[in-house]
């Protein structure tokens, strides 16, 4: 299994704007999910084994922090023509199957992934109440076949710090996963074809 790491967008970056369709066909924008105590943006997809590995924890963690006034939104930017398991129709079924309470959006032209410098699935971006990036990186140290339990401890610690207005360390570990499946000609400069899966 070949692995791709987060680009580690500079801390302090303002959340790039977006307006994307959710699994009900409604447009959801950055302004729709702003104004809470924090905002978590997740780049993910349906078929990636790294995402499948964390599905249960992702459900429980997001439910817990949604109740604490953290807004959550997930975005799939994969090329659905080449990867039909990641189509909008399949996203609808996946959201229902997993019981996700957050909007799951489709970035068809992949411009939002590029704006966030997203590289892999899953890729996590945590913004404070002013939409400034305070954490980017891994959910925790668990990976498929690692034998390490999925706890969400890294992301949980970051969200707890934001909610308590405590400083966050800038020593953050990148997420690891499958590369975003770029459409021909869309590959960003940071794309590493050696890190494809």
Image (cartoon, helix red, strand yellow):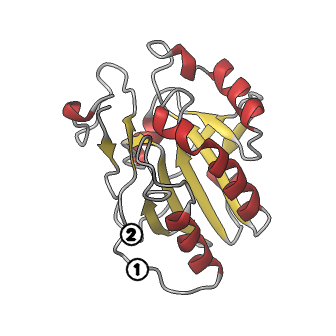
Q: Nearer the viewer, residue 178 or 38?
A: 178
The reply to whether residue 131 is in sight is no
Residue 189 sits in quarter: top left
The answer to whether 118 is drawn above or below residue 23 in the figure is below
> Which of the two residues, 22 or 4, is positioned nearer the viewer here?
4
x 58%, y 72%: residue: 130
Image point 77% across, 46% down: which residue?
Answer: 101
- Residue 11, disc: 2
| Residue 33 placement: quadrant | bottom right
Coordinates of residue 150 in the picture (x, y in percent): 55, 54
User: Which residue corresponds to the image point at 59% horizontal and 71% vertical from the top-left?
Assistant: 159
The residue depicted at 65 percent of the width and 27 percent of the height is 91
| Numbered label tally | 2
- In the rendered image, which residue does mark 1 sit on? 169
> Residue 21: horizontal and vertical position, in percent?
67, 32
> Percent from the top left, x then y, of residue 163?
65, 78
Helix, strand or loop under label 2: loop
Tell me which numbered mark, 1 or 2, is placed earlier along the sequence. 2
What kind of element bears circle 1? loop
Q: Is residue 26 above or below residue 65?
A: above
Query: x%, y% of residue 93?
Result: 72, 24
């Amino acid at each position: 299994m070949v692995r791709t790491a987060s680009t580690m967008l500079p801390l302090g970056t303002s959340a790039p704007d977006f307006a994307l369709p959710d699994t009900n066909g409604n447009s959801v924008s950055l302004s729709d999910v702003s104004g809470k105590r924090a905002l978590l943006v997740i780049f993910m997809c349906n078929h990636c084994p790294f995402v499948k590995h964390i599905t249960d924890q992702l459900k429980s963690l997001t439910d817990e922090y949604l109740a604490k006034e953290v807004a959550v939104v997930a975005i799939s930017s994969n090329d659905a023509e080449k990867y039909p398991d990641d189509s909008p129709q399949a996203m609808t079924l996946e959201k229902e199957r997993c019981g996700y309470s957050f909007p799951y959006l489709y970035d068809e032209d992949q411009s939002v992934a590029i704006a966030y410098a997203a590289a892999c699935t899953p890729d996590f971006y945590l913004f404070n109440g002013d939409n400034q990036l305070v954490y980017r990186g891994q959910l925790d140290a668990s990976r498929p076949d690692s034998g390490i339990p999925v706890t969400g401890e890294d992301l949980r610690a970051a969200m707890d710090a934001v909610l308590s207005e405590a400083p966050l360390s800038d020593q953050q570990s990148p997420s690891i996963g499958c590369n975003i499946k770029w459409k021909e000609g869309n590959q960003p400069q940071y794309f590493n074809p050696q890190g494809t899966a």
